[in-house]
Image (tube, grey):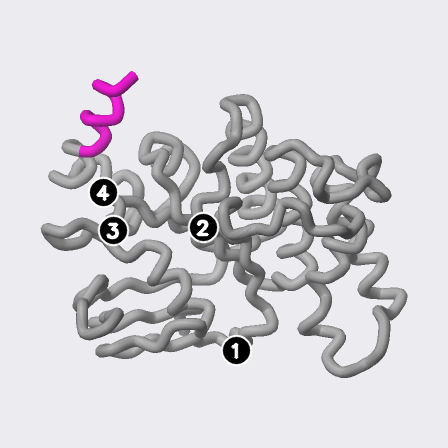
Amino acid sequence: MSLITCSGISFSYENQTVVSGLSFQVEQGDYLCIVGENGTGKTTLIRGLLGLKKPSGGKLLLGDGLKSTQIGYVPQQDAVQKDFPASVYEVTLSGCLNARGLLPGYNASQKKRALENLKLLGISDLKNRSFQELSGGQRQRVLLARSLCAAERLLLLDEPTTGLDPIAIEEFYALMDVLNRERHMTLIMVSHAIREAVEHADHILHLSQDGSFFGTTEEYAASAFGRKFLGEEENDR
């Protein structure tokens, strides 16, 4: 059974439909990038997958035993309180909140998980630094480490490279490749960088005012959507 199945799903705000009749599936181990113009419902869809927004139509099913507590989330940097008064370690460890439940404090296993994720992302040396002192790229790594404390099977990311410099963007996509190919983490990422999405992901979901496309990266590159938008991005360089 698929990890996620969306069948004719729609989302609306105040009777205004922003996503209409969308159908796609995500299997365990997939790397899906959601691309498209602004205002086509990409972030709304992510909120729906997180259970924060109810569909106005269609069906959204979590399958294969997937639980909401097994899903990690990296929000847009604009949605993050950059002056949050906590250390890197404290922010990372807070990703274990759902697993902790109502128990006081964190157990040894959760603390170990936080330290392992800091090491995985190459920021162990920042453990005791204040989150508010970090650069954009460093903050994004901390948020990713935090999400990995929550994620066991699925990681959702909403425009995670916005505001990062080219080197930080390249490093971020390399980390995604490691998580997907070596740790077999299922990834669903909203991205404005269509060319990078095609280079790294194995499936593309393109949302547009004129419809949508879902398929493999190869199918997308050969489609009318892919030819148009990949060509536009190339012309912008």
Q: Is residue 175 left or right of residue 229?
A: right
Q: Nearer the viewer, residue 19 or 29?
A: 19
Prevailing secondary structure of the magenta residues: helix
Q: Is residue 89 left or right of residue 165?
A: right
Secondary structure state at the residue bearing disc 3: loop
The amino acid type of the residue labelled 4 equals Glu
> In the rendered structure, which disc, 4 or 3, sits on the residue that comes first in sequence?
3
The disc at residue 5 is none
Q: Is residue 161 left or right of residue 235?
A: right
Of labels 1 and 3, the one closer to you: 3
Eyeballing the image, is 20 above or below 74?
below
> In the rendered structure, which disc, 3 or 2, sits on the residue that comes first in sequence?
3
Structural distance between the alpha carbons of marks 2 and 4: 23 Å
* Residue found at x 59% / y 46%: 179
Badge 2 vs badge 4, beta-carbon distance below 8 Å? no
**Residue that sits furthest to the bottom in the current view:** 102
Please state the extent of the stretch shown in magenta in the rendering: 229-237
Identify the residue under disc 3: 39
The image position of residue 83, as x and y in percent, is 67, 46
Identify the residue under disc 4: 219
Structural distance between the alpha carbons of marks 1 and 2: 24 Å
The image position of residue 150, as x and y in percent, is 65, 63
Badge 3 vs badge 2, beta-carbon distance below 8 Å? no
The amino acid type of the residue labelled 1 equals Gly
Identify the residue under disc 2: 158
Badge 1 vs badge 3, beta-carbon distance below 8 Å? no
> In the rendered structure, which disc, 1 or 3, sits on the residue that comes first in sequence?
3
Are there few (<14), some (14-19), or many (20+) residues within 10 Å of tag 2? many
Of labels 2 and 4, the one closer to you: 2
The amino acid type of the residue labelled 2 equals Asp
Q: How many marks?
A: 4
